[in-house]
Amino acid sequence: MWKAYKNGFKAWLQLEKSLSDNSVEAYLHDIEKLTQFLMLQKQEKEPSELTLKDLEKFVCWINELGMTVASQSRIISGLRSFYKYCQQEQISASNPTLLLEAPKTQRKLPDVLNFEEIEKIIAAIDLSKPEGGRNKAILETMYSSGLRVSEVVNLRISQLFFEVGFIKVIGKGNKERLVPIGRDAIKYINLYLQNIRTHIIIKPGEEDIVFLNRRGHRLTRVMIFLILKALVKIAGIQ
């Protein structure tokens, strides 16, 4: 779908910008990364349809791939050049890269949070929205049981044993373990299951997954990181 845009961008870089072959290939590789992400997300969007939020999710994804800050910044620079081309050629009326932030070495999520910081993050959740109740249940679960993000997104209702205060977790290498879960986490998971999740049209195959998005799919790791990043910012934690 993007082949024509890539070819046009390549010609623009060569003729308008007079870039070397290596530089042109580097820019095209940046756009290839974006289209790879869109395919994985099953999004068939044109350049004019992509929003700032879409590109922020993409940046989160390349960060998860383990790319260095320098590599991420270069890719963002490539996206900015691509959208300059799109605007000049009237492919896109808007430029979603204008407010796209390049990664900063000191703006990562804190490796370790103390009790006060965790309380601030949980307090920053907007409970007036359905996703707020879900997010509170997620954070309470992670805090109470020490689950990894990948374990939270794959947590199943059939793995909840609240009557004995435990949940069964399937971790790395498909290894199972029982971990204790606190009363607050149990309370907010039940509130989510009874008052929020029941109003979601659940996609086939996701019926047993605890935490779902509005479209009835399980959450992705990227989505959890975006939620945490937003709450850390609201809570004012450096």
Image (tube, rainbow, N blue to C red):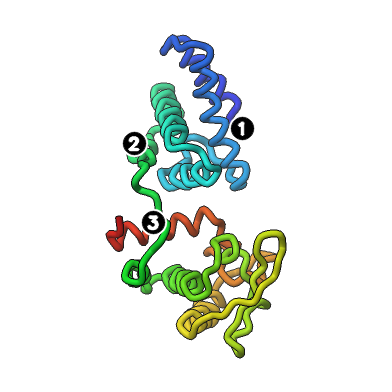
Using the image, determine if residue 74 lies above or below residue 171. Answer: above
Split into 4 quadrants, where in the image is the C terminus? bottom left
The spot of residue 56 in percent (x, y) is 43, 45
Q: Give whichever of discs 2 and 1 has the lower sequence position.
A: 1
Look at 58% across and 45% down and name the residue there.
Answer: 43
The disc label shown at residue 35, or none: none
Please tell me whether mark 2 sits on a helix, a strand or a loop. loop
Say whether residue 90 is visible.
no
Q: Which residue is mark 2?
A: 98
Q: Which residue is mark 3?
A: 110
Q: Nearer the viewer, mark 2 or mark 1?
A: 2
Q: Position of residue 63 (x, y in %)?
A: 49, 43
Q: Secondary structure at mark 1?
A: loop
Q: Position of residue 193 (x, y in %)?
A: 55, 79
Relative depth, front residue between 151 and 37: 151
At x 52% / y 22%, what residue is drawn?
A: 26
Tell me the kind of residue under disc 2: Leu
